[in-house]
Amino acid sequence: MTKVEKVRKIIKILNEKFGKPHCALDYNTDFELLVAVILSAQCTDVRVNMVTKKMFEVVNTPKAIMEMPIEELEKHIKSTGFFRNKAKNIKMCSRELVEKYGGRVPDQMEELVALPGVGRKTANVVRGEIWGLSDGVTVDTHVKRLCNLIGLVNEGNVEKIERELMRIVPKERWIDFSHYLILQGRDVCIARRPKCKICEINHLCNYGRKRMRELAKKS
């Protein structure tokens, strides 16, 4: 089975399981999503949603965050980890949005990745969720891990992983494919204790097939 064939089978199975996927971060505006994605680095979506629910009641526009003392912003986001660096980036990002784009979040990849704290992964998430646009495949820790376990890649570099996924995943499914692997990673293929026995795609996964053979020998 080729990687392209494997990907199509995985998409079909996970589509039947999860339906139309969507971003797990809570937001009401483009800017709120951008901030939430920045905060999600090295932090769970559940924690980010808890933090932003309270913070966005107080401040939720680029101008407001630009004018907020950084110490106050740090207090809001402290529990997300690396809060000083995140607060600095969010403040600088907000200023650039106000000064360069009139407070609007740009939809072009090159403009997004030029913003402080916004890398390709963040830009892919925002463009895909807000505008349905995709210049690539979002590769977070779940996507990186599952793609290696499944055997779609043998690579730790996220940029190289993205390039390979762009080659084997149908372009119209780039956004959905990332969502599906993230959802499967949270639900079944948990990092420290993957539940291969009940995984719906274990027969398509190199690691899953190996684990199933090991379990069969023990039984």
Image (cartoon, rainbow, N blue to C red):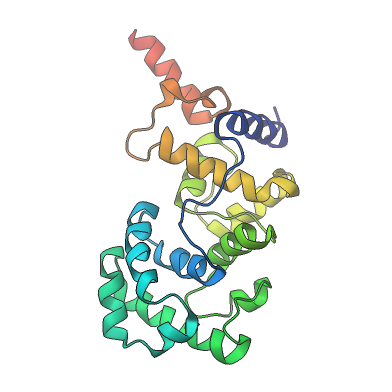
Does the rendering let one see residue 189? no
Q: Left or right? Give the position of 109 relative to 55.
A: right
Image label count: 0
Q: Left or right? Give the position of 105 relative to 132.
A: left
Most foreground residue, 49 or 112: 49
Q: Position of residue 108 (x, y in %)?
A: 69, 73
Q: Left or right? Give the position of 66 relative to 151.
A: left
Most foreground residue, 24 or 41: 24
Dividing the picture into quadrants, the one containing residue 65 is bottom left
Q: Position of residue 13 (x, y in %)?
A: 61, 28
Does the rendering let one see residue 142? yes
Dividing the picture into quadrants, the one containing residue 53 is bottom left
Residue at horizontal 31 percent and vertical 88 percent from the top: 69
Q: Position of residue 27 (x, y in %)?
A: 48, 61
Where the N terminus falls, by quadrant? top right
Most foreground residue, 154 or 83: 83
Where the C terminus falls, by quadrant? top left
Residue at horizontal 56 percent and vertical 68 percent from the top: 30
Residue at horizontal 63 percent and vertical 58 percent from the top: 128
Q: Position of residue 88 (x, y in %)?
A: 38, 82
Name of the residue lying farthest toward the top = 219
